[in-house]
Amino acid sequence: MAKRALITGVTGQDGLYLSELLLSKGYEVYGLVRGQNNPKLPLLARDVPGVKVLTGDLMDLSSLIRALNIAQPDEFYNLGAISFVAYSWENADLTAEVTGKGVLNALEAVRLYCGDDMTKVRFYQASSSEMYGKVQAVPQKEDTLLWPRSPYGVAKVFGHYMTINYRESYGMHASSGILFNHESPRRGPEFVTRKVTQAVARISLGLQEELVLGNLDARRDWGFAGDYVEAMWRMLQQDEADDYVVATGETHAISELLDVAFAHVGITDWAPLVRQDPAFMRPAEVDLLIGDPTKAKTQLGWELKVGFTELVQMMVDSDLAEQKALSGK
Ligand code: GDR
């Protein structure tokens, strides 16, 4: 019998890559989609046509239980969240509800669905390097002290510890992947990598004059989302549930991202094209992220396939193709 998976956040970047991966492995994939006429549904249908769509909401426990009863999954991947950190200051309450309490709802739905047999469903929680915030060790590992710096980070810490708590309280096979930034051509344009690659493509085609950014000094550990969903799946194939850092082990400043992206279209001096605006600065910043993926590599056999330069170039190429198609240039 084919394995079955239920994914929340299925229309997001990671949901699309994970669906593709699971379908390629012969899974029956169910995706939970929020709201009426969700605008991202056509994209899901176009990119990953094999996903069976169920309606539901992380803030609605009964909708989760209903989805579980229909999908009867072996694996539940909780990728749904409000995921844009900057937005979380303006919508802290909503972020707490969806990104934090939503995890509890998902865990509780799985617990109720499992009843006496907690082995029925394996659970994955999308935890985040934003939990490290004001970093207390370099590089960051699974046991590094958490010090979140945004309402988003605080909500993710709640979800992370709730996942551990359900594992310890009920023996649930619940794993938490502490994923560092992961990007792709499918990344939303509000995140800095895609904002940069889209602007670089548009500037090189004469469609845009300047790129306006916030803090150029922040450093991030950027990997390719397609590689990271493989780690999620591997976590749920282990005999024991656990927590894993998924990262490249390299860190780059935003200015290095600009170097690589602009160089790919032949622009070496980007300074005159980039302007900083305090509007894009955050009330509290996470200055430096660099993860130690040793545990994921040794225990999961997880491997990184796409490096930083290749990732940025892949995104610029994809944006060039998209902008050419849109503009007819
Ligand atoms: P992040 O990603 O907050 O790390 O969270 P983002 O790409 O938004 O920011 C990365 C860094 O770039 C700086 N920055 C800007 N960011 C944006 N978005 N726009 C700008 O104009 C800009 N200028 C500078 C930011 O200040 C920050 O330091 C992502 C999300 O996907 C989370 O959901 C996920 O949990 C973490 O990665 C791991």
Image (cartoon, rainbow, N blue to C red):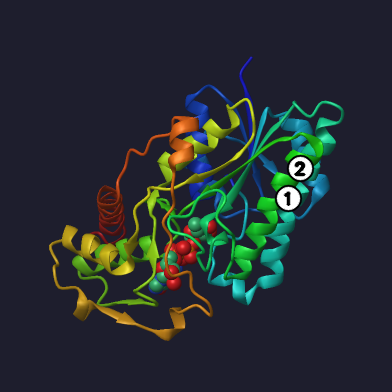
User: Residue 80, position in %: x, y?
Assistant: 62, 51
Q: Is 227 or 66 nearer to us in this picture? A: 227
Question: What amino acid type is highlighted by mark number 1?
Answer: Met
Q: Residue 162 has which mark?
A: 1
Q: Looking at this view, is 178 or 80 the one in front?
A: 178
Distance between the alpha carbons at the discs numbered 1 and 2: 6 Å
* Residue 287 placement (x, y as % from top left): 43, 70
Residue depicted at x 14% and y 67%: 267
**Crowding near the residue tagged with mark 2, few <14, some 14–19, many ≥20 C-alpha atoms within 10 Å:** some
- On the image, numbered disc 2 is attached to which residue? 166
Residue 291 appears at what percent x and percent y? 44, 52
Q: Could you tell me if residue 57 is visible in this image?
A: no
Q: Compared with residue 130, is residue 4 higher up or lower down, i.e. above or below?
A: above
Q: Locate residue 91: give its quadrant.
A: bottom right
Q: In which quarter of the image is the C terminus?
A: bottom left
Mark 1 lies on a secondary structure that is helix
Disc 1 crowd rating (10 Å Cα; few below 14, some 14-19, many 20+) is many
Q: In this view, does 137 lie to the left or right of 63?
A: left
View extreme (right): residue: 116
